[in-house]
């Protein structure tokens, strides 16, 4: 039998190498060799783009083969946190995820933003991928490298690298396996593989997986369970070895999903009721519309209200359209995190097709030339109820009190019986706000490497890589991010019926929806060009080129020096497509047309230098000691679009850099029956990219941080058939020298400031309390009309302080740069910035801990069946979801317990496993997303899976 991978027996790597519990004792039952059944298996990885034993690689790395993934119940990417130190995972708000290593991940939200952890498949970088939606199948191994890996792996590997190595065809041998699982939630899983030899020099391997289950969440409105799964993936790989010096493979993989997966989770809020008096001065009913911000800061377990709808763009404008009189979310919120009220069941479709290929050629006896290429197409579109809560009140049948009296006669003509006919959302007499998040993308990669294997002291690894990526087509209705509301449509219809009186001209509805029969959001017949909803578009193209190389010099048999350098040239380009909510359009105008291009180019040199030393110690069998300095780089990018002519935030954001200092040691003890690996690191993090919502857009800024930590990975076979493991991660990740305005506390708790709602944009502002009270007094005295405070955030009275007796009255505040500024009494400001120095970075728990024990009863009752019992415990300490570290930002510590019992017959190839995952049914919030001012500052929460249990039957041939 020949295997084109050149690899040895690959089991499980690192101190996470738990598969040895299967390999050692079971192999002993079948093997009469002199090797102790307790000896840990040899592990091969390709972390440095060449095959090496993991204990000889001077990198902190964990690796898992397919058997280990099954035994540890690591079904997909999100589960890896339970077996790797200093790793965290949470979903994102826009069909994304955040996989963090040592606190480094993707806190940036932008089409042009790069992940902090490189996601690779077979060493191919994947900018858009479904790796954390699909489940693992037919895997040779999964490798997770911790720490900056930019020299060999690329521009966006500042935190580390996830690399999925798929199983390749085996030449000259027929192989097959199949696996079926049934569990609670009506879960059905199927995985399988067949390996077909095609003569002596080629083989075809076909593999696939399917997952179907009911939903974890109840939609009380429709009566259905949602957040279900219906997805599959298939992969075909053709391998060939025409000569002794040339080999290669070609692979095609397709993934597809169509179900009700929840993109954003339960909506959490501690309602801001507003106020009806201020400093003893009454606030009129219309002025009260500016007093609520929607939600206020509170711990997540106390944030179980519904958002105050009058503080949202759609809800607030719905009041001025006459549809509503105030807040419509009056009923108590449902506290259960797995129960929602959605007007329709979520709709989620995703697919990806990946073509990849690799060719290798030996040049003489000492050089290997490798070409690795790929082309991929990916798409995802998700449609959800934006609030997931039913309104308590229906629309007014006659115009409400806050509509412009001149427009009131139009109300019964446009909305008979209080019914709004929305071409995207359908006809309804209640408040509806839905959203859509989607993207289509294409990517191609080409990589060329030349590696040496000389007998002398010096060897090298040289390469070049080209990546081309593009995403978001404005003329594809699935692309971009939409917020659609029938209240916004109603205001547009009033404007158009009044000859453009509200917005200065006619605002067209969607050109596709106007001829669609029904609600075009659901059949995607809309064209995406309507001015009655919000749509953010960032058509983006990336061209990236890099050359890299590492040299390895053996100073002696025990000491090796490594020097690596990489030059990266990132060319980023984004079409300017301004948002066009309520924007009048001339006849024939195209709001989707590009109005120009924004460009951001970055050229950087990064690298690493260090040593690894094989020490001869009396108390270990093998010891490797290493130390490295590395510089990591992640490119800057381009912020999302703004309304035409606006300058609300910078158009671009800067790159981030990590100066990493790391020392480590890998040790084998007691005749190969124990391993202990230790790693310590310190990062100087420059330009850490984070996002904050401004005017309904995710705006990215740069701050600085410092990180340090320690990682321990250990495993031990104390007696035959036993395996004990432990992983510990300690991390201290803090923001430094940074100021910022917290949108949840713009006044910074100061009594001399007050936060108000801008009734035009529904963003929030801050004015002096004295100035606000003075305007209220003028309204009470009849000098100003009720509703005049609604103009404070737009600066309606700024510069008129003398007329109010406020001449010379000022307030001082701190801006986002940490500088002291002064504002007049009626001048609106963004807020008073806080010092964030010493605050914890989000998604960076201080401690992660994994403990596991496994025992195997070999040859039970003198049969060919072995029985293995295994238990895993994982704990993650408290962490933060934002750099402001307010009560709302706190994420509680959590734990997870998995149990499994496996009957396995290596001779026949049969196996049966009974498993329980999250045995104690912990309900864990892994991350949150704070929405913007115009959404009322509610929080979307993301959860882990509930308790799962089931039975798996396996057969291999």
Image: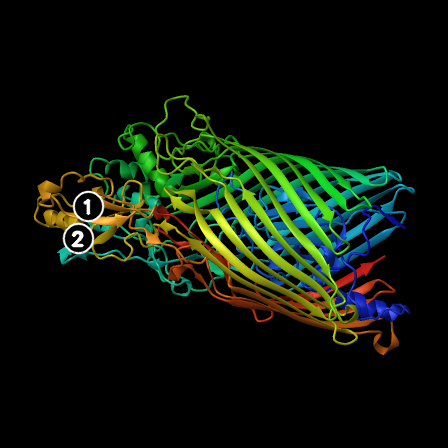
Disc 1 designates what residue?
A: 789
Q: How is the image coloured?
A: rainbow
Comparing 935 with 548, the one in front is 548
Neighbours of disc 2 within 10 Å: few (<14), some (14-19), many (20+): many
Q: Residue furthest top?
A: 588
Give the side of residue 781 with respect to residue 257, left or right. left
Q: Which mark is residue 283?
A: 2
Residue 336 visible in the picture = yes
Neighbours of disc 1 within 10 Å: few (<14), some (14-19), many (20+): many
Q: Where is residue 764 drawn, in percent x and y?
A: 30, 47
Identify the element where label 2 is drawn: loop
Q: How many marks?
A: 2
Identify the element where label 1 is drawn: helix
Q: Is residue 279 above or below residue 668?
A: above
Q: Where is residue 562 drawn, in percent x and y?
A: 68, 48
First in sequence, mark 1 or 2: give its number. 2
Comparing 629 with 592, the one in front is 629
Q: Residue furthest bottom?
A: 861
Q: Is residue 479 above or below residue 217?
A: above
Cα distance between the residues tagged 1 and 2: 9 Å
Q: Where is residue 690 drawn, in percent x and y?
A: 45, 47
Name the residue: 58% across, 44% down. 156
- Location of the C terminus (image quadrant): bottom right
Give the side of residue 113 with respect to residue 738, left or right. right
Residue 423 visible in the picture = no
Labels 1 & 2 near each other (Cβ < 8 A): yes
Q: Which mark is residue 118?
A: none
Q: Quadrant of residue 357?
A: top right
Give the side of residue 62 with respect to residue 494, left or right. right
Name the residue: 57% across, 71% down. 920
Q: Where is residue 863 drawn, in percent x and y?
A: 87, 74
């Amino acid at each position: 039998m020949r295997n084109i991978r050149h690899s040895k027996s690959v089991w499980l790597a690192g101190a996470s190498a738990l598969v040895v519990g299967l390999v050692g004792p079971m192999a002993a039952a079948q093997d009469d060799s002199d090797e102790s059944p307790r000896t840990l298996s040899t592990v091969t990885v390709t972390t440095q783009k060449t095959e090496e034993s993991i204990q000889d690689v001077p990198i902190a790395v964990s690796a898992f083969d397919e058997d280990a993934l099954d035994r540890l119940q690591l079904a997909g990417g999100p589960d890896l946190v339970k077996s790797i130190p200093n790793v965290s995972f949470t979903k994102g708000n826009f069909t994304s995820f955040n996989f963090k290593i040592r606190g480094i991940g993707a806190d940036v939200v932008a089409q042009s933003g790069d992940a902090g952890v490189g996601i690779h498949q077979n060493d191919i970088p994947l900018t858009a991928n479904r790796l954390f939606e699909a489940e693992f199948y037919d895997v040779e191994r999964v490798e997770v490298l911790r720490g900056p890996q930019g020299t060999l792996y690329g521009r966006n590997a500042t935190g580390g690298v996830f690399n999925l190595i798929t199983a390749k065809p085996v030449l000259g041998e027929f192989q097959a396996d199949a696996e079926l699982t049934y569990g609670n939630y009506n879960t059905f899983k199927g995985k399988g593989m067949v390996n077909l030899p095609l003569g002596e020099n080629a083989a075809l391997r076909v593999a696939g997986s399917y997952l179907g289950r009911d939903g974890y969440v109840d939609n009380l409105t429709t009566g259905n369970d949602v957040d279900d799964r219906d997805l599959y993936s298939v992969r075909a790989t053709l391998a060939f070895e025409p000569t002794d010096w040339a080999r290669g493979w070609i692979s095609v993989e397709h993934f597809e999903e169509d179900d009700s997966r929840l993109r954003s989770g339960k909506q959490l809020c501690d309602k801001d009721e507003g106020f009806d008096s201020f400093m003893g001065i009454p606030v009129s009913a219309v002025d009260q519309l500016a007093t609520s911000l929607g939600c206020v800061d509170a711990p997540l377990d106390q944030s179980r209200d519904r958002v105050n709808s009058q503080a949202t763009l759609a809800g607030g404008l719905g009041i001025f359209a006459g549809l509503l009189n105030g807040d419509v979310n009056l009923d108590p919120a449902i506290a259960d995190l797995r129960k929602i009220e959605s007007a329709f069941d979520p709709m989620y479709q995703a697919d990806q097709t990946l073509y990849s290929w690799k060719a290798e050629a030996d040049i003489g006896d000492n050089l290997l030339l490798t070409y690795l290429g790929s082309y991929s197409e990916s798409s995802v579109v998700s449609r959800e109820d934006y609030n997931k809560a039913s309104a308590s009140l229906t629309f007014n049948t006659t115009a409400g009190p806050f509509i412009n009296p001149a427009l009131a006669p139009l109300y019964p003509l446009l909305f008979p019986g209080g019914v709004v006919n929305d071409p995207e959302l359908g006809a309804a007499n209640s408040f509806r706000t839905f959203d859509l998040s989607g993207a289509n993308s294409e990517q191609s990669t080409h990589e060329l490497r030349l590696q040496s294997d000389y007998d002398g002291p010096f060897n090298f690894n040289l390469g070049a890589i080209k990546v081309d990526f593009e995403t978001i087509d404005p003329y594809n209705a699935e692309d971009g991010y939409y917020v659609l509301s029938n209240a916004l449509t109603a205001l547009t219809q009033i404007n158009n019926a009044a000859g453009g009186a509200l917005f200065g001209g006619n605002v067209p509805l969607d050109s596709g929806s106007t001829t669609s029969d029904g609600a075009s959001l659901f059949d995607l017949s809309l064209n995406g060009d309507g001015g009655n909803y919000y749509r953010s578009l960032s058509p983006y193209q990336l061209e990236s080129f890099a050359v890299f190389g590492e040299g390895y010099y053996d100073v002696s048999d025990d000491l090796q020096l490594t020097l690596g350098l990489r030059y990266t040239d990132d060319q980023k380009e984004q079409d300017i497509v301004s948002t066009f909510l309520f924007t009048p359009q001339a006849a024939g105008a195209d709001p989707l047309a590009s109005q120009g291009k924004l460009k951001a180019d970055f050229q950087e040199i990064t690298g690493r230098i260090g040593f690894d030393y094989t020490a001869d110690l009396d108390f270990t069998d093998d010891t490797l000691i290493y130390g490295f300095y590395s510089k990591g780089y992640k490119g800057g990018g381009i912020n999302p679009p703004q309304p035409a002519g606006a300058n609300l935030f910078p158009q671009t954001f800067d790159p981030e850099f990590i100066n990493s200092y790391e020392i480590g040691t890998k040790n084998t003890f007691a005749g190969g029956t124990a391993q202990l690996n230790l790693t310590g690191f310190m990062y100087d993090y420059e330009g850490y990219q984070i996002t904050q919502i401004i005017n309904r857009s995710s705006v990215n800024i740069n701050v600085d941080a410092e990180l340090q930590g320690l990682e321990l990975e250990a495993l031990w076979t104390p007696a035959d058939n036993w395996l004990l493991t432990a992983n510990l991660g300690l991390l201290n990740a803090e923001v430094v020298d940074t100021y910022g305005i917290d949108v949840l506390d713009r006044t910074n708790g100061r009594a001399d400031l007050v936060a108000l709602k801008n009734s035009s944009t529904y963003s929030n502002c801050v004015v002096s309390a004295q100035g606000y009270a003075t305007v209220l007094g003028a309204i009470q005295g009849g000098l100003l009309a009720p509703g005049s405070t609604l103009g404070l955030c737009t600066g309606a009275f700024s510069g008129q302080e003398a007329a109010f007796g406020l001449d010379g009255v000022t307030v001082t505040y701190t801006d986002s740069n940490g500088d002291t500024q002064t504002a007049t009494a009626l001048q609106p400001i963004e807020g008073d910035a806080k010092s964030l120095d010493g605050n914890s970075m989000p998604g960076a728990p201080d401690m992660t801990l994994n403990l596991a024990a496994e025992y195997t009863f070999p040859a039970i009752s003198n049969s060919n069946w072995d029985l293995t019992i295994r238990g895993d415990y994982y704990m993650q300490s408290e962490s933060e979801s934002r750099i402001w570290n307010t009560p709302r930002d706190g994420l509680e510590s959590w734990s997870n317990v998995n149990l499994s019992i496996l009957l396995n017959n290596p001779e026949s190839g049969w196996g049966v496993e009974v498993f329980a995952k999250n045995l104690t049914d912990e309900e864990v919030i892994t991350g949150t997303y704070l929405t913007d001012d115009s959404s009322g500052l509610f929080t979307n929460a993301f959860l882990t899976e509930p308790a799962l249990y089931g039975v798996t039957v396996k057969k291999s041939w």
